[in-house]
Image (cartoon, rainbow, N blue to C red):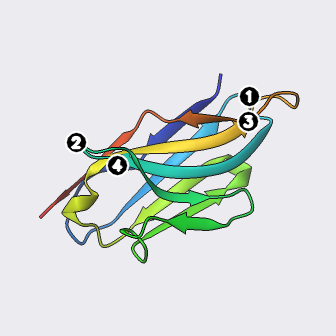
Amino acid sequence: QVQLVESGGGLVQAGGSLRLSCAASGSIFRLNAMGWYRQAPGKQRELVAGITSGGSTNYADSVKGRFTISRDNAKNTVYLQMNSLKPEDTAVYYCNANLRVHMFSGSDDYWGQGTQVTVSS
């Protein structure tokens, strides 16, 4: 069974940094795009950053210049380096991966359990 396990969340003061990690494990034939989403109380889940299998990236306007997404294909892991954090970055952050579990299967999205990021002022 495929699992995405996130780590690195926590409490940090405004202006500080955190590095989130998400490792995919289990039966994976091919790992395609990966990304980070976040959801604050009372708000919809939104895309923070995404990265393709080839390394192309995209970011929400609100985090451009502050966050950096990267991946290690050998480890099936995606990272999110978050610098200059703001209170409005406070949310539960979710890892997402599009992958194939078998060579004859289609691609599907999988989600991590979420990790809390809290930025105090």
At which x and y percent is residue 50? Answer: 56, 58
Q: Describe the element under mark 4 as helix, strand or loop.
A: loop
Q: CA distance from mark 3 to mark 4?
A: 28 Å
Q: CA distance from mark 1 to mark 2?
A: 33 Å
Q: Describe the element under mark 1 as helix, strand or loop.
A: loop
Q: CA distance from mark 4 to mark 2?
A: 17 Å
The amino acid type found where label 2 is placed reads Pro
| For residue 72, above or below residue 109 | below
Q: Residues within 10 Å of mark 3 (few under 14, many from 20)?
A: some
Q: Which residue is mark 1?
A: 27
Q: Residue at x 53, y 45 (%)?
A: 22
Do callouts 3 and 1 mark residues in contact (Cβ within 8 Å)?
no
At which x and y percent is residue 41? Answer: 22, 42
Q: CA distance from mark 3 to mark 1?
A: 13 Å
| For residue 107, above or below residue 76 | above
Q: Between disc 3 and disc 1, whose residue precedes?
A: 1
Q: Which residue is mark 4?
A: 9
Q: Which residue is mark 2?
A: 41
Q: Which mark is residue 107?
A: 3
Q: Between disc 3 and disc 4, whose residue precedes?
A: 4
Q: Between disc 3 and disc 2, whose residue precedes?
A: 2
